[in-house]
Image: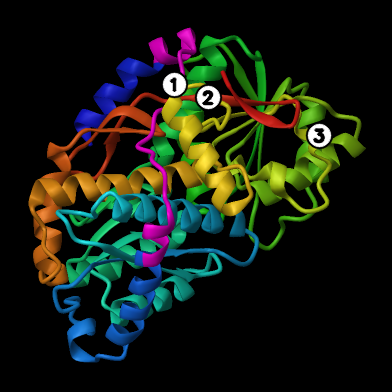
Amino acid sequence: MKKYRKIISAVMASAMVATLFAGCGNSGDSGSSSADNTAAADNAADNTAAGGETAAAGNNGGTTIKIGGVGPTTGSAAVYGIAVQNAAQLAVDEINAAGGINGVQIEFKFEDDECDAEKSVNAYNTLKDWGMQMLVGAVTSGCSVAVSEKTAEDNMFQLTPSGSSVDCVKYDNSFRVCFSDPNQGMASAKYIGENAIASSVAVIYDSSDIYSSGIYEKFVAEAANQPFEIVSAEAFTADSKTDFSVQLQKAKDAGAELVFLPIYYTEASLILSQSSTLGYAPIFFGCDGLDGILNVENFDTSLAEGVMLLTPFAADAQDELTQNFVSAYKEKFGDTPNQFAADAYDAVYAIKAAGEKAGITPDMDMSSMCEAMKAAMPQISLDGLTGVGMTWDASGEPNKDPKAVKITDGAYTAM
């Protein structure tokens, strides 16, 4: 953790002022052979799940490496979960087509948690019964924290692509691909201040959500070091997240030029719509939770024009690896991948790199595999979609440069 904080504080000023944001990924073509392998893996999964004690112990008999995934594929945060599921499957297909991990094929199975912590734990248990040996997930912070209690008890290796709460990686078996909430808050305040985007800022945040409140607290702390003033800070909760007229009116009356939204895209879409109704048109700035706002049903996406957000991936980046990933994702799923997809894709390739470094074999039980993966993660470096030369500390935190995007002409554009 100390190493990560030291590195990110050093790179943020130079990375953001220069706005030299680039993304790379490990991409390849997935063909009929990988599809056949996946179909065969599904059949093997059914047989293993029916096998009983061996599967429950996290040992699938030595034929494949079983990776599970947990996240919301239904409900208000489904955009996140579907993206993670799709991109992880794409990475699995590519890796299998290229020979797997240490010559062994991967099986991948994803369970819906509806962005509910209790259901996320249930999903984890379902996957454990299936024979899961490693977990990619959970997708959201609250669910990832809940599941981490179980993975710690079982000593199962857990790599969350997008769980950003500090507590997501409080155990030594847990790692993450994304930045933590505090560092998103600090990075946002630095970016606004160092680029002189606004001199007066309002904040609207969810005090009942650990993701939102964690970012908010660090944002306020760093804002004291920046040349802008927080003129309004208004909270809402899970029980009051449909009407934001009071929060917006206070921001407007205070003369806020920019409104910082450390929240998820569903609520953000309502705020942008209601702000337009009030005749209030500030700059809106958010973090990775806003990624998905262009996909909200019945939302006028023209209202999101000019919205800025810190996110480690832009689908329009011109490097070859990003273009290959976007092309393959669009071909397979008929959609443009978002940052959560990129995080998940990198997560699976990080597992491949660490698994090969550790020399894991499919006959290892979940605890033995976890010990090997924990030792290997701080030794790997990954050129991924969300960062070049990414490394990990034993604390579970990634080391990589931050990036930002702006919504321009209805698309996320690298800044």
Instruction: Measuring from the top left, give residue 255's x and y in whole percent.
Output: 78, 21
Snapshot quadrant of residue 63: bottom left
The residue where tag 1 is placed is 22
Label 2 amino acid? Ala
Residue 320 higher or lower than 54, as above or below: above
Query: What crowding class fits label 2: few (fewer than 14 Cα within 10 Å), some (14-19), or many (20 or more)?
Result: many
Quadrant that contains the C terminus: top right
Quadrant that contains the N terminus: top left
Mark positioned earlier in the residue sequence (2 or 1) = 1
Residue drawn 11% across the image and 63% down it: 361
Instruction: Measuring from the top left, give residue 226's x and y in whole percent.
Output: 50, 14
Residue drawn 22% across the image and 69% down it: 64
Rounded to the nearest angstrom, the CA distance separating label 3 from label 1 is 27 Å
Snapshot quadrant of residue 131: bottom left
**Front-lying residue, 68 or 247:** 68
The residue where tag 2 is placed is 317
Cβ–Cβ under 8 Å for marks 2 and 1: yes
Label 1 amino acid? Ala
Cβ–Cβ under 8 Å for marks 3 and 2: no
In this view of the protein, can residue 138 be seen by the observer? no
In this view of the protein, can residue 399 be seen by the observer? yes
**Which span is picked out in magenta?**
13-36
